[in-house]
Image (tube, coloured by chain):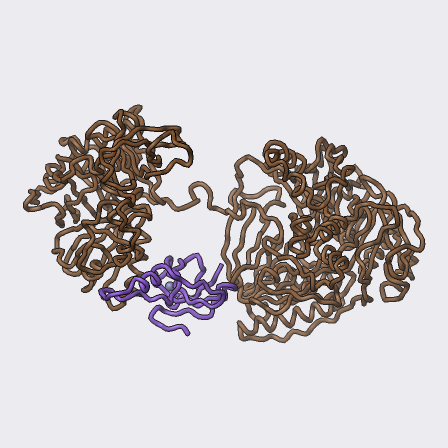
Chain colours: A purple, B brown
Amino acid sequence: MLYIKCPYCGLRAQKEFSYGGDATVKRPNINEEVSSDDWDNFVYMRKSPRGKHIELWQHIAGCRQWIKVQRDTATHEIFQTAKVTEEIR
Amino acid sequence: MSQPFRLNKEGLINRNKKISFTFNGKKLFGYEGDTIASALIANGIHLVGRSFKYHRPRGFFGAGVEEPNAKLQVEFNGHSEPNVNATEMELVEGLSATSQNCWPSVNFDVGAINNFLKMFFPAGFYYKTFMWPKSFWYKIYEPFIRKAAGLGVASIEKDKERYEHKFEYCDLLVTGSGPSGLASAYAAAKNGAKVILAEDKPRFGGTLLTDDVSIDNLSGKDWAEKIITELKSMPNVTVKNRSQVFGYYDHNMLVMFERVSDHLEKKSKFTPRQRLWYIRAKETILSTGSIERPIVFGNNDTPGIFLSAAAKEYMKVYGVLVGKKPLIFTNNDSAYETALEFKKNNVEPIILDTREEHSSELIDEAKSKGIDIRFSHGVIVANGYKKVKSAKIGKLNKDKNSFEKTETVDCDCICVSGFWTPSVHLASQSGNKLKYEEKIDAFIPDKKKQHETSVGAANGSFTLEESLKHGFENGSNLSAKITETKTEISIPNVNEKKYGAHDKFWCMPLPKNENPKRFVDFQNDVSVSDIEIALREGYRSIEHVKRYTTLGMATDQGRTSNLNGLQLVSNIENKIVPEVGHTTFRPPFTPITIGTIVGREVGMEYMPTRKTPMHEWHEKNNAVFVDAGAWKRPRYYKQGNETLFEASKREAKNVRENVGICDVTTLGKIDIKGPDAAEFLNRVYTNAWMKLPVGKARYGLMLREDGIVMDDGTTTRISENHYHMTTTTAQAANVLSHLEYYLQIVWPELNVNVVSTTEQWAGAAIAGPKSRDMLSKLYPDLDVSNDAFPFMGYKEADFFGVPSRIFRISFSGELAYEINVKSDHGMFMWEKMMEVGKEFGNQPYGTEALSTLRIEMGHVAGPELDGRTIPSDVSLNGLVSKKKDFIGKNSLGREAFNVESRQKIVGLIPIDRKSSIPEGSHIVQDQNAKLPNPKLGHVSSSCWSVENNNPFSLAIMKDGKNMIGKKFFAVSPLKNKSIEVEVISSHYVDPEGKRVRS
Ligand SMILES: [Zn+2]
């Protein structure tokens, strides 16, 4: 079971979180024209890297904040966690 | 009742307490502190089971977790448990053990015929033979294999015991209380670290209990006792025996299985049987020790053949002799200690050493005691069927591939030692890639992957001095980093015997024309020839060889067989062992009970139960409940002998004719506040929200980004910047997360807050033509006229002294209102409504009637919003704004969503107006068409229309409304029904929606 450091609550067990997918995907702006290719890429296309992956988790049984987690998809090592307003590099 | 193999005084058992038990029906006794194995051996019993494939007689081989053979069916404390390791299970009064995998008895086993047919049971036998003909599998092969093979019998009784889970955090977890584990725990404890020390066995000390050593002038056993006593007295230390750390998971989470009370004769009602510990450790010391490696020879599975260290443990811990005429067969010095222990107890052993004549501290001591040592010798084959009677031994030639001479010697046990294999299972589970250490011919942990540090024998150091030093150093350094305190500890003086080098030799050759089975894996009956066949047939990867031969796949996980198997493969393939590699170690290290895994999550505790504030009223009034997620909702209120069908019809009819009330507390409720709330709702819902006035509700539809309908519900503007959203019961949690996602990540610029208020409000719907009359009685001061309080209106008013919210919304399609009060007042509200509603013929209605009402109105719900439908599929495209953007809008233009023939909602009635159409039925043109019959759609919801008094269904069907008037068949192979149906509008009752506005 992963041990995830919520930037608001500290280290908590994976049980308290739910997974939210790739954090680098950006939704096209509301009320702006978007090509159907760009839209389809946003809705359907996801990379599935082996290795470092920046992803969203929600601290669902805690502060309910969505957070960013940089995790190795093969080893589950977590390198960094951050608020969604912060950058992970 | 004598015990012929019990020594007079040796051992750590309590000779003052006799314990009686039975084995295969025979009454026997042992002592407190015995295992089933030690008590049986004391009684001279060695034949305890039959092997898996050939049904060969099997006895004990080890003295602990490494045991491959002695798995028994054990009954105690009202349990019957299969596959119990006799070498681990402690004796308790009244225990009864029986042999497994034998019929009719362990002494005469019909299946043993397999042993004589062994040429027909080579590696891959099952794969090859039972593949053909295919039709034979279910009827003939499979039942045969089931009967002939298999281990114990699982109980079909409900497990009455209590199991617990525990979560624990510590600075340092130490797994194993041998010398290196004790030293690590002690050093860390002295640094003030929070330490957990786990020991699998009942007694602490590991090899200190059996090795002839001294530490600071104390015997190993006394030193261990001294350290444990001190550790137990420290508040920062938890010391646990009978506790096996069996799994090493991500982020230093280890899981431990504690046998809390199986060894107790009496226990209190609330003492659990077993406990599962989830331990999050900052650092872990793996001091799991090592397991002795066997040497392979002919008939090496005969009862009476032991690992040499096990034989020593039986003498020193249990005061039991495994035999009185022992042969010690070894490739290293450690077995000499076993020989010396026999000698000390006046038993004369013969040592067969595969090495050439040489000298070492232990060899010299054995010589000086007059022990018969034969160098360059080994056991070729053991003789005796149910017990070893003699052995053919031989003098090996220089190349060790044939014999210079052979002879037969009498013996009643053979104690074998092929050097030591570090127990690297936990290290490997942690992700540590193991490395091969040539010096000890075994794998040891390589670079750390998590926070694990292997010490002592688990790390390949087999001397006490080194183990203690590693233990103290690592325990001290690892904990000092955490506690920032370092207490100096002087490493004690150690007195131990020096070992010479071992012989790299593990498999005895066979003399010409002799072909006894030489077993590598006892538990799965894998022999040398099976591995040879697998390689001959082209299997190269060790993982493939493992699966083809089943080497190392049984419950003992190949603890005694893995390395010998690898060595064999590497010899045949002419490779070195590290090139062959090793198979993967997976948790659990040792079998654990299902009860422990499940813990307290059984029955009512399986998941939380959510009850509405009116639950007790429903119970008292004969509600039959249905699960809606974790909620309990009344399905119907039973009157007399009513069936579900009759009751729901009555309740629904009463709503259509009079008035009914329904507990709608379970609907999801979300409070939305902030200056940008309207803008947010406008983006979340498909319809327009910017102009909703205060005091008005609106029905809203929300989509996922892929255009699929996510949920529907009403949202009410309570005040300028305050909205009250409702969701379906099922989607409440998802919708909240969805809203939080957009507010926190996508549009953080919107100043809006959302919070779930589902639990804060109790809700009741009053529906039916007389609901307005009833409302006016509930709120005498309120103008409830259609003009003053129109459809989709909202009011706040006093409900008999209690603040309440009134929404004029309808799910039933009737004139209806929904009233919310604070949860604490829910019961008060409900009872008041029942009382006031009497004169209007008010009756409560459950979810079944609720469904009937919404289905015949054509109001879609979960079965239609099934994650595949877009708004136009369910006739809700009127709610989709063309002017503004919203979540999922761009997806609605996708080509597949706009095909005319797309499956859309319709209504169905049976031609005979009588036959109910099963939900899930497929709609087909021709009920007799050849399979696969083209499917035109499916029936999503069915009811008995109380308005029209005949069955009615909603269906999602190709071409949708274009099909109205046509006839098809609704086919349910599951219910074995085929019903001719006519397609009609999905709005069967009040299609114009006049009633809700009346
Ligand atoms: Zn948090």
Residue B781 x %, y % = 7, 44
Horizontally, residue B854 falls left or right of residue B219, namely: left
Specify the quadrant that holds the N terminus of chain B. Answer: top right
Residue B48 x %, y % = 73, 40
Horizontally, residue B680 falls left or right of residue B524, namely: left
> Which residue does the image show at 58% across and 51% down from the upper left?
B258
The quadrant holding residue B360 is: bottom right
Residue B202 x %, y % = 65, 52
Rendered position, A87 above or below B957? below
Using the rendered image of the protein, determine whether residue B617 is visible from the camera's viewpoint.
Answer: no
The quadrant holding residue B851 is: top left
Specify the quadrant that holds the C terminus of chain B. Answer: top left
Horizontally, residue B159 falls left or right of residue B892, namely: right
Nearer to me, B737 or B955: B955
Number of numbered tags placed on the structure image: 0
Residue B828 x %, y % = 21, 41
Using the rendered image of the protein, determine whether residue B930 is visible from the camera's viewpoint.
Answer: yes
Can you tell me which quadrant of the image ligand 1 is in?
bottom left
Nearer to me, B648 or B951: B951
Outermost residue on the front side: it is: B930
Rendered position, B398 above or below B841? below
Nearer to me, B719 or B366: B719
Nearer to me, B394 or B430: B394
The quadrant holding residue B145 is: top right
